[in-house]
Amino acid sequence: KDFRNNVKPNWCPGCGDFSVQAAIQRAAANVGVIPEQLAVVSGIGCSGRISGYINSYGLHGIHGRSLPIAQGVKMANRELTVIASGGDGDGFAIGMGHTIHAIRRNIDVTYIVMDNQIYGLTKGQTSPRSDLGFKTKSTPEGSIESSLSVMELALASGAGFVAQSFSSDLKELTSLIEQGMNHKGFSLINVFSPCVTFNKINTYAWFKENLISLSTVEDYDPENRMKAMNTLMTYDGLVTGLIYQNKQKPSYESMVKGFKEESLASQELSLKKEEFEQLAAEFM
Ligand code: SF4
């Protein structure tokens, strides 16, 4: 059950993504899967490298497309536990359409977004999660676009599992990833994961000062969608914990009529070897 491999991450020292990697490895061990039962699919960005740093099946996909690939993996082999991952630029800019449709489709994939509110890999440009007035090379006079309210958007889109955490809080993050992996349907976990090299505003200290734990919100009930929305709007989305869970929402897989019990990946190929080779040759 060891999800560590011997690849050394090349993230900058202090990058929040190290903790996200550790949390995924711990959560996977805690839910009781083995490396051969886990697939991690990532997009492009610093965080996209994570699929190569975990001892499991891994696929480092293309920009903004970790979700279509992850959903395909799950549909082909439902015996796998599937994690999709990437950054806020990957998931909430180029990949936003996929995010919304994955939420409403509800295939059993856990989507972990490493949200550093900037594009790190391309050396520091404003992202859809950057705050109004945020200065970078792409907005030298300050961003005049407001930050995308992703948690509110997920709730409004009918998400069955929405959570948010901070990479420094390894205990909470691990627990939320475990809950997401155990949830039967799509789960979105947004993780504030500081980019220590390019984002000098949203630092570890800034998050420690500004994040509110839902455990401190009076009578908070993660099954109450209205309360969840209200709380997010009250604290401008800066909350951590399990924001909302609807255990009754049926997963996509459970709704597909005639979906065979046996995974596609374990079924015999109906094509003979020669037919398959002929078909493959046509694509060469
Ligand atoms: Fe992390 Fe930022 Fe360095 Fe990328 S540039 S590895 S996000 S600290």
Image: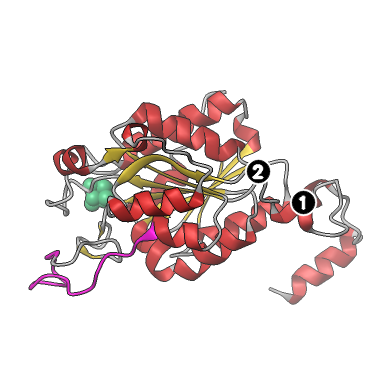
Instruction: Say whether residue 138 is magenta.
Output: yes
Going by the image, does 77 lie left or right of 151?
right
Name the residue: 59% across, 49% down.
109
Going by the image, does 159 lie left or right of 130?
right
Q: Which residue is mark 2?
A: 184
Going by the image, does 78 lie left or right of 191?
right
Check if mark 1's residue and mark 2's residue have beta carbons within 8 Å. yes
The residue closer to the viewer here, 241 or 57, is 241
Image position, residue 168 (x, y; %): 28, 33
Magenta stretch prevailing secondary structure: loop
Image position, residue 146 (x, y; %): 24, 69
Sequence-earlier tag: 1 or 2: 2
Image position, residue 95 (x, y; %): 45, 67
Q: Tell me the amino acid under the disc marked 2.
A: Lys
**How many numbered discs sit on the rendered protein?**
2
Secondary structure of residue under mark 1: helix
What's the mark number on residue 254? 1
Can residue 55 be seen here?
Answer: no
The magenta segment? 134-150
Secondary structure of residue under mark 2: loop
Name the residue: 16% across, 39% down.
209
What's the mark number on residue 26? none
Callout 1 crowding tier (Cα within 10 Å): few <14, some 14–19, many ≥20:
some
Question: Among all residues in the image, which is located at the extreme left?
Answer: 141
Name the residue: 87% across, 55% down.
269
Name the residue: 43% across, 62% down.
153
Q: Is residue 204 above or below residue 174?
A: below
Going by the image, does 32 lie left or right of 123?
right
Q: Is residue 78 above or below residue 172?
A: below
Q: Tell me the amino acid under the disc marked 1.
A: Ser
